[in-house]
Amino acid sequence: MQGFTNKEINFDILKERAFNMRWAEVEDGVIPLTAADHDFPIAPEIVNALTDYIKDGYFPYVPNRGMKEFKLAFAKYVKERKNEEINPEWVLPIDSAASGMAVIARAFLKPGDEVIVFDPVDFLFRTSMEAAGAKTVLFPTNLQEDGISLSGLEDYITPSTKMIGFCNPHNPMGMLYKKEELDYLLSLSEKYGFYIMNDEIWSDIVYPGNRFNSLIEFGPERNKRTISVYGFSKSFGIAGLRIGTIYCMNQETYDAVVAASMVDTTIGGVNLLSQVAGIAAMEKATYRLDAFLEQIAENQQYALERIEKMPLIHCHKSQATFVIFPDVTETGMDPVDLVNLLRDKYKVSIVPGGARFFGPGSAGHVRICLATSHEILKEGLNRIEKCMRDLSNS
Ligand SMILES: Cc1ncc(COP(=O)(O)O)c(C=O)c1O
């Protein structure tokens, strides 16, 4: 697709700068379809906003709890794009969604509290909550063709359950939740009094024909204990700027989050340039996000078609996110061994399922990132196919 081909990608720069299992960390010749990050340059409007700000030569302290323009832009952005009604007063810019998760966990958990984490789900839920001293109870993610079902969740709740980690849309399954499921989750939070760490970082990345439903749409009364987090890495490709947002539904939870973040002491706080980039992204770069979504939709369709024709690997049709999560149990291999084989012999790097990244329930799967050009994805899939054919013939 125009704007998203190899012509636009500067591989020399990626080789120098793109870490976290990506181009700068793989051997020459290996294609990384690993960490969920973009291969494309960001929207020029974000670059211009940064250079305009930099050229004045002033980098003073900005408000501890974040720039007013950022908070207003965020409230407007989520209202317009996702019908989420939030109060800008209760928005806290934070240095990444990952950091936001850690702050939320610190704000509401104490050692010995129980938390429910889906299995599989991104490792950050478990990591952030365990860092706060909590004890994790795993809830098996119930994948259905039309979304993730929360049926049976109540059985996992005990009097010690203090928080549930909720990834909507779900990474790595790439799935959404129906409104009934969200209603059910909120009714459990109301009944048992646990907090919900509501991670909506993937909420912009939804495939045509699907709709992202947010817990926030149920209003502040029902979301008294919902604390949400969003990040700019997935939608706008600025992971290295470490910018995200925590948004609360009342003063009480906001105060707790602010205290845990330590922004008022200046120990915590977000780089002002990252806030400038975030504002430009929300106000000026949504056209680029929409074009990126078209590229991703094409990539997803192509990848699923290709995988369908390969032996030993199967993939469900995802509804959201730019990762896919195929089942490779038929290879008979441990995903870590399979991923090592793919990297060392077939020169394509992907993320293994298993306890380390997504939880024990993800054993038998691998995750493939689609945020690249058609050319790169095609070559990566050619290599995966070669491996699968060799394995099936051996
Ligand atoms: C579900 C989820 N939450 C949080 C993050 C972290 O995002 P950030 O780059 O803003 O720290 C990721 C990144 O992959 C993610 O998938």
Image: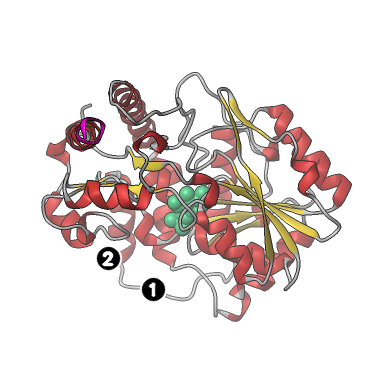
In the rendered image of this protein, does residue 349 appear above or below residue 272?
above
Residue 222 in which image quadrant: top right
User: Which of the image's four quarters has the C terminus?
Assistant: top left
**Residue at point 62%, 76% (across, down):** 264
**In which quadrant of the rendered view does residue 217 lie?**
top right
Disc 2 element: helix
Whether residue 392 is in magenta: the answer is: yes
Q: Give x and y (percent) for residue 312.
A: 33, 30
Residue 97: image location, x then y, percent? 51, 57
Q: Position of residue 204 (x, y in %)?
A: 48, 37
Residue type at the position of mark 2: Lys
Segment tinted magenta in the rendering: 390-394
Taking the spot 54% from the left edge, 40% from the top edge, the residue there is 170
Which of 250/205 is in front? Answer: 205
Residue pointed to by mark 2:
55
Spatial distance from mark 2 to mark 1, Cα to Cα?
10 Å
Q: As drawn, which residue projects farthest toward the top?
A: 209
Q: Is residue 251 left or right of residue 137?
A: right
What label sits on residue 59 in the rendered view? 1
How far from the left and from the top, in percent, is residue 286? 41, 37
